[in-house]
Amino acid sequence: MSIATNNIAFNVDEIRKDFPILNREVNGYPLVYFDNAATSQTPKQVMDAIVDYYSNYNANIHRGVHSLSQEATDKYEGARRKIQQHFNAEKAHEIIFTSGTTHGINLVASGFASILQKGDEILVSALEHHSNIVPWQMLCEKTGAVLKVIPMNEQGELIYESFEELVSEKTKMVFLNHVSNALGTINPIKKIIDKAHEKGAAVLIDGAQAAPHIKADVQALDVDFYVVSAHKMCGPTGVGVLYGKEEWLNKLPPYQGGGEMIATVSFEKTTYADLPHKFEAGTPNICGGIAFGAAIEYMNSIGFEAIARYEDELLDYATLKLQEIEGMKLYGTSREKTAVISFNIEGLHPYDIGTLVDKMGIAVRTGHHCAQPIMDFYKIPGTVRASFSFYNTKEEIDRFIEAVKKAKSMLS
Ligand SMILES: *Cc1c(COP(=O)(O)O)cnc(C)c1O
């Protein structure tokens, strides 16, 4: 299958050759991997970068005078610059390597503990992942700040008018995701960032679920913090970045103490290193950072516009086909969404559907998707979630639909 997108032939058969795992069988069937919102698969270009690192220049960075250390440092800092360019950050030192989205959020939340005062307000959206709820609750406990929730509607969209009513001069920060991992909703972050700034509040956007589909421009968005994980965008687990505006990163205290993050140390007084090292205590995930750079390069070689267009096609196709199944209930029907479909079938438990389709080689997610408040809103224990990537195909969706139908007839 091949569709012309922006004069670039989007050849999914060629792309699939980059992903060795797509050739394997599961329970006697060729694998259909529809759990991309939990983690993406890894192309051989990224695996090559990992093997190259360990085969040729594995060394600790930023300290050695020897050649290997210099080479590793150059590659690691090169990856930082690739990531900087990708997100259009003004300065490379505004890109802080982390272990992932969760780490990035905790770093910022912990830093704000020294800024917030009793009675200050934090707004968080109803569509959040637990990793974007719990750190703020902990922060409120520590500081006496108050957490308020921007509500959502039946379609799984944030209610902007409610946000406008909630945000005030008391609001010190607003936290929300760019794309909901449970429903696929794309949130109107630019509008929210501008409104929050009018009131003097800082905004952190959790970009973990948007990053594999949408190229965010942090300067155009004028966002204060943007966090992502590499493993959702063809990179390895255990690495991600926090983008922060320089002035904010200078204002926040270091998150962890240790090597790498200091300028001078004595028992009387320690001075901190400049950005980004102030926030990068200890030996980082050197190989992971380099592989993250390779993943970003790989995705850009395919092109984010082409990716989005192709994935939208998959989403529309699957939505149409699923709706033909009797008793089907889709959750998250926002007009603006990425290729995530959450659903239940009347009278059936999502876990049973997930287990049966797995027997037919199809990987989907079932449960609350780390977003229990969303499930509470719909008064359900969970959903079946199929999430697509640019290496998936319509043929795979056909197999999935057949499997769901079969599961349904076995369970009813
Ligand atoms: C996956 C995800 C996270 C958590 O990412 P980690 O890599 O587990 O830290 C947070 N928010 C959203 C929207 C996600 O999809």
Image (spheres, rainbow, N blue to C red):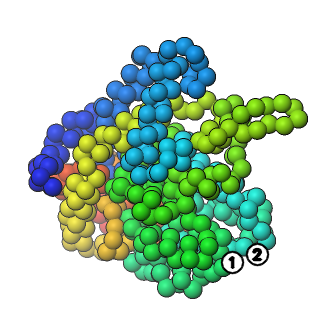
Corner quadrant of residue 48: top left
Q: Viewer-proximal residue, 343 or 126?
A: 126
- Rendered view: 180 above or below 211: below
Q: Which mark is residue 170?
A: 1
- Residue 340 shows in the view: yes
Q: How crowded is mark 1: few (under 14 residues within 10 Å), some or many (20 or more)?
A: some
Question: Mark 1 and mark 2: span between their CA atoms?
Answer: 8 Å
Residue 293: x and y, percent?
40, 37
- Which amino acid type is shown beneath numbered disc 1? Lys
Disc 2 marks which residue? 119
Q: Viewer-proximal residue, 247 or 138?
A: 247
- Which amino acid type is shown beneath numbered disc 2? Gly
Quadrant where the C terminus is found in the figure? bottom left
| Secondary structure under the numbered disc 2 in the rendered image | loop
State yes or no: discs 1 and 2 in contact (Cβ < 8 Å). Answer: yes
Residue 382: x and y, percent?
47, 65
Horizontal relation, residue 141 to residue 154: left or right:
right
| Secondary structure under the numbered disc 1 in the rendered image | loop
Corner quadrant of residue 173: bottom right
Corner quadrant of residue 272: top right
